[in-house]
């Protein structure tokens, strides 16, 4: 153990072992030494979650959750509050980038088989985080009370009316009135403030599950010994910091140069319950799900398919029958994976257009393929696919004799 | 790796610190600067916004119907402001030693008023007194009790009584000795636009007094 010599640190640690915990889970934490840059996105998402919570708390100090004042209070944030424009643009674009990072993180998990035993619960907790994020983002989008806020809230809450028997009662309960109105805005504000902290709690569990067996790696094989891993700090802290720097440059470009590129101009028109805008589009990160909803010509089945497209992710660890984790060694799955990525992009593209002409047909094919991938291809490919031979250890592909234990992995870092 | 790096670069210069020490300290210092820069807009956002500051502009008050002996209470910058038309008896009382000998700061030496109100009547025109109606103890609004004697005791000469902790002020807002409030009631910047209109929040043309320099509100 490499605790500092400091007596106060020792005194505290003997009673409250926070320093031992950090040393064990951050400094010593053995991490596969072959992680590539796709492994940067988890910690990046965590940092963006922090940015969202901090900017959100300061925005909440200026925002008024009332149908008569919400829109104006957001405009006041943009014009009158010191740096209000900055906080709002960071929060607004931060939501989009949070989804970018989490989607990349999710597809990385799918490609490298990070959901397979013993990491099934780690994966499921990740899907829970995604579902909570979607709920939080949806309710946050309602708060500025523009046209898209209002009509988005109307359409999404009406999804629940599809359920036979109880549907209308559920929707009335969600609204707290006869339509999306002031009670709806109030409760969405309360929940939009609450849910991020629930996400933080689930992220905590996600990390507990992660640290139980450690990170998966591009080869998808377990570490065989200390020669296969390096301590998280400083090797991956510095790599994560570098990735953060690159991310913040891209993020800053959006915040300062194209702050409204990902936003819908219709949401700068105050909500009008008497007029639906000519074109209703959700935020880009919901477009694939929106496409699935519109592709199915039955209200109930469309809603079920939309929810099902997320729920199916929960059972991915058991749908994939292959014992090999990484797509690197799976010649068939590798191609099918990229087809799924393409399929999701097509769904997003279809979701951004009116359901007319070819878009309907393409949308239906893409929706069908989405479920085909998870429910049929994933189990079937695992049965017949011949995986490439796996290397004996993480070190062996790059070092002839399996590598030697790195000095840095064993050295206790001494503070000068 | 770390060990070999230390032995190579550290060896001879370990006493005065290694190249790595320099990089670690420099990187951490830069991170500190970055964190401070990120925190600044958030902290600044809690200061009054532009619309709040704009609402703090001077206000014009019509005093044409304010009779001698009366007080009106108006709002400027979210604060109560007293405007009093003192009658000749009250003005005479302010100059007697019966009053001034009991005061903590009878000559208004503490900076609780603009220079043009640093006089025995603490105002521009002797009869029209303008005060921020906030007790300098803990922020309550003192009661206007111009009648001598009564419930406030036989010695009461008329003035302001704070119901929260019993602080007492005379008819010029000067605090009495032996009460919790430390300073006289503040006089805001004000001027007469004409004989019947007071503008609160603006100095007379010949003064550039900064209200922010006041000791305590």
Image: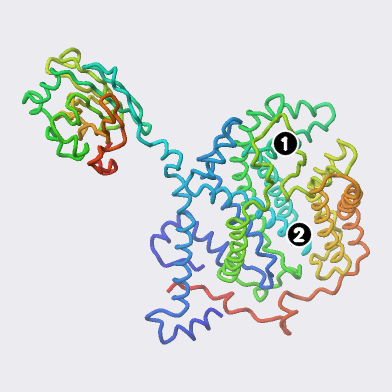
Label placed on residue A107: 2
Foreground: B51 or A2?
B51
Name the quadrant containing residue A78: top right
Question: In the rendering, at what x and y percent does residue A275 appear?
Answer: 73, 32
Residue count near mark 1 (Cα–Cα under 10 Å), binned few <14, some 14–19, many ≥20: many
First in sequence: mark 2 or mark 1?
2
- The residue tagged 1 is A151
Question: In the rendering, at what x and y percent does residue B69 appear?
Answer: 21, 17
Seen in the image, is A338 located left or right of residue A413? right
Residue count near mark 2 (Cα–Cα under 10 Å), binned few <14, some 14–19, many ≥20: some
Q: Are marks 2 and 1 in contact (CB under 8 Å)?
A: no
Foreground: A153 or A377?
A153
Furthest residue toward right: A384
Name the quadrant containing residue B98: top left
Mark pair 2, 1: CA separation? 31 Å
> Quick check: A299 above or below A365?
above
Foreground: A19 or A348?
A348
Chain bearing tag 2 is: A
């Amino acid at each position: 153990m490499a605790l500092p010599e400091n007596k106060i640190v020792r005194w505290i640690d003997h009673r409250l072992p926070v320093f031992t915990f950090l040393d064990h889970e951050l400094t010593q934490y053995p991490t596969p030494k072959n992680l590539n840059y796709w492994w940067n996105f988890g910690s990046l998402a965590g940092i963006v979650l922090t940015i969202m919570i901090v900017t959100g708390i300061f925005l909440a100090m200026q925002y008024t959750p009332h149908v008569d004042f919400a829109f104006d209070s957001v405009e006041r944030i943009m014009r009158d509050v010191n740096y209000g424009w900055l906080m709002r643009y960071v929060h607004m674009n931060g939501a989009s980038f949070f989804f970018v990072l989490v989607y990349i993180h999710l597809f990385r998990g799918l490609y490298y088989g990070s959901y397979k035993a013993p990491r099934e619960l780690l994966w499921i907790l990740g899907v829970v985080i995604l579902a909570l994020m979607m709920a939080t983002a949806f309710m946050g989008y309602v708060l500025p009370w523009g046209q898209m806020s209002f009509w988005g809230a109307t359409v999404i809450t009406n999804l629940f009316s599809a359920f036979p028997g109880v549907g209308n009662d559920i929707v009335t309960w969600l609204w707290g009135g006869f339509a999306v109105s002031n009670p709806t805005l109030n409760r969405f504000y309360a929940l939009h403030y609450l849910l991020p902290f629930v996400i933080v709690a689930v992220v905590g569990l996600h990390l507990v599950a992660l640290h139980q067996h450690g990170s998966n790696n591009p080869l998808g094989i377990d570490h065989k010994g200390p020669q296969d891993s390096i301590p998280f700090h400083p090797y991956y802290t510095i790599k994560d910091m570098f990735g953060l720097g690159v991310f913040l440059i891209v993020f800053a470009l959006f915040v300062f140069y194209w702050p409204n590129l990902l936003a819908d101009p219709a949401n700068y028109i105050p909500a009008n319950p008497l007029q639906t805008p000519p074109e209703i589009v959700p935020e880009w990160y919901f477009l694939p799900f929106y496409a699935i909803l519109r592709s199915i010509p039955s209200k109930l089945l469309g809603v079920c398919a939309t929810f099902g497209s997320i729920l199916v992710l929960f059972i991915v660890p058991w749908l994939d029958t292959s014992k090999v984790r990484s797509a690197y060694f799976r010649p068939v799955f590798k191609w099918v994976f990229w087809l799924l990525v393409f399929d999701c992009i097509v769904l997003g593209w279809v979701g951004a257009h009116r359901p007319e002409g070819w878009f309907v047909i393409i949308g239906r094919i893409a929706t069908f393929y989405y479920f085909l991938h998870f429910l049929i291809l994933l189990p079937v490919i695992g049965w017949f696919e011949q995986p490439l031979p796996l290397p004996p250890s993480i070190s062996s592909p790059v070092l002839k004799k399996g590598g030697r234990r790195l000095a840095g992995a064993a050295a206790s870092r001494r503070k000068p | 790796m770390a060990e070999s790096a230390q032995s190579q670069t550290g060896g001879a210069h370990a006493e005065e610190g290694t190249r790595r020490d320099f990089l670690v300290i420099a990187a951490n210092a830069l991170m500190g600067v970055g964190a401070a820069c990120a925190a600044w807009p958030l902290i600044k956002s809690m200061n009054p916004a532009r619309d709040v500051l704009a609402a703090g502009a001077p206000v014009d008050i019509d005093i044409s119907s304010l009779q001698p002996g009366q007080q009106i209470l108006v709002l400027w910058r979210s604060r109560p402001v007293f405007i009093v038309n003192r009658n000749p008896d009250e003005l005479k009382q302010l100059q007697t030693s019966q009053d001034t000998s009991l005061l903590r700061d009878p000559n208004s030496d503490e900076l609780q008023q603009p220079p043009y109100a640093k006089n025995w009547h603490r105002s521009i025109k002797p009869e029209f007194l303008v005060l921020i109606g906030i007790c300098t103890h803990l922020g309550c609004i003192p009661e206007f009790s111009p009648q001598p004697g009564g419930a406030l005791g036989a010695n009461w000469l008329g003035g302001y009584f704070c119901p929260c902790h019993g602080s007492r002020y005379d008819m010029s807002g000067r605090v009495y000795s032996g009460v919790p409030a430390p300073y006289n009631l503040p006089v805001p910047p004000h001027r007469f636009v004409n004989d019947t209109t007071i503008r609160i929040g603006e100095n007379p043309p010949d003064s550039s007094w900064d209200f922010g320099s006041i000791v305590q509100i």
